[in-house]
Amino acid sequence: MSYENIIAEVKEQVSYITINRPKQLNALNKQTIQELSSAFKEADENDDVRAIIVTGSGEKAFVAGADIKEFADFDITQGKELAAAGQEKLFNLVENLSTPTIAAVNGFALGGGLELAMSCHIRVASDNAKLGLPEVSLGVIPGYGGTQRLAQLVGKGKAMEMVMTAGMITAEEALQWGLVNHVTFTSELLSKAEEIAKAIKRNSPVAIGKAIEAINAGYIDGVNGYNVEIEQFGLAFGTEDFKEGTTAFMEKRKAQFPGR
Ligand code: DAK
């Protein structure tokens, strides 16, 4: 599929999705959210793709937030509808993909940009990255899952402070707070994300999908994560990947997982 605001390509079983509006610091307008949604779905449905890396074009920003010019004149109903649609279409979609997603945060990750990074399963940041949820400085609150996912990642107290002050934290602080998994020099950001993707590629994609589902289940209200784990654990025994993984171990060779 061809896109206007993003670049999507697959190399060596990794899907690279690059948000490409550098003049607007890759701000997320409606069309970009739609394109990202399609690209993530397309990558997840491609059996050849074992990991997805999402990043921003240029050296300055991952994503500097939702496009302020677009939502400036919204009313209450539009705000609510668009938050619900956006969460469903992109942010919840990404969090629940069975293909691992890695955000390579190359600069500003603000508002909707940080919310996108937080929807991903893993985050790597360049040392010049600045992260924040500045929504209250505009008179709104984070609307793409930020109030929930930030508290899950850094704890309630730090989330409260970040949201209320609308301040930005550095990559190093984000690392200390557990908001990102790794910090690298800017020039090494993509290779660090690729190194993680490479390690993931060695393992069973079916088992990874089940593990993602079980981990996420613990954060869904009313769902018992342990029960989901038991269910998914049991189902794993019926997969070709399980047969291949155990056979390869006994034959002292590397497993070649069929992904079924
Ligand atoms: N939206 C639109 N344009 C943006 C933008 C954004 N979020 N961020 C930057 N730009 C544009 C600037 O307007 C500027 O465009 P020109 O003036 O050159 O045409 C260009 O990108 C370069 O930006 P600056 O000149 O400002 O660059 P600086 O290096 O001086 O500053 C900055 C970088 C990141 C500190 C600054 O650009 C900045 O403060 N940007 C805004 C950050 C921000 O507040 N982001 C929005 C967070 S709130 C919703 C759901 C969710 C949300 C909203 C609605 N609904 C469901 C309705 C979420 C909201 C947010 O994300």
Image: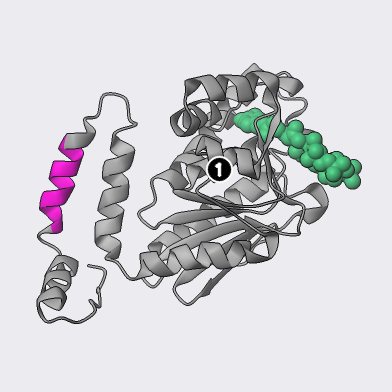
**Residue indicated by mark 1:** 175
Task: Name the spot of residue 221 as percent of width and height, x first.
Answer: 31, 25
Quarter-of-image position of residue 170: top right
Residue 108 locus on image (x, y percent)? 71, 44
Task: Write down the quadrant of residue 99 in the picture.
Answer: bottom left
Residue at 15% over, 57% down: 236
Q: Nearer the viewer, residue 22 or 254?
A: 254
Residue 255, can we see it?
yes
Of the pair 8 and 219, the residue shown nearer to us: 219
User: Percent position (x, y) of residue 229?
Assistant: 19, 42
Image quarter where ligand 1 lies: top right
Furthest-right residue in this view: 23
Screen quadrant of the C terminus? bottom left
Quadrant of the drawing holding the N terminus? bottom right
Q: Is residue 220 above or below residue 9?
A: above
Look at the magenta stretch and give its main secondary structure. helix
Image point 70% across, 25% down: which residue? 166
Q: Secondary structure at mark 1?
A: helix
> Colour mode?
one colour
Residue 155 lies in the magenta stretch: no
Image coordinates of residue 35 in percent, x first then y, are 60, 54
Residue located at (47% from left, 77% from top):
12
Give the extent of the magenta segment: 227-236
Q: Is mark 1 within 8 Å of ligand 1?
A: no
Q: Name the residue type under label 1.
A: Leu
Q: Nearer the viewer, residue 190 or 77?
A: 190
Q: Residue at x 13, y 53 (%)?
A: 235
| Image mark count | 1
Residue 54 vs 130, above or below: the answer is below
Q: Is residue 4 visible?
A: no
Q: Is residue 226 depicted above or below 141 in this figure? A: below
Crowding at mark 1 (Cα within 10 Å: few <14, some 14-19, many 20+): some
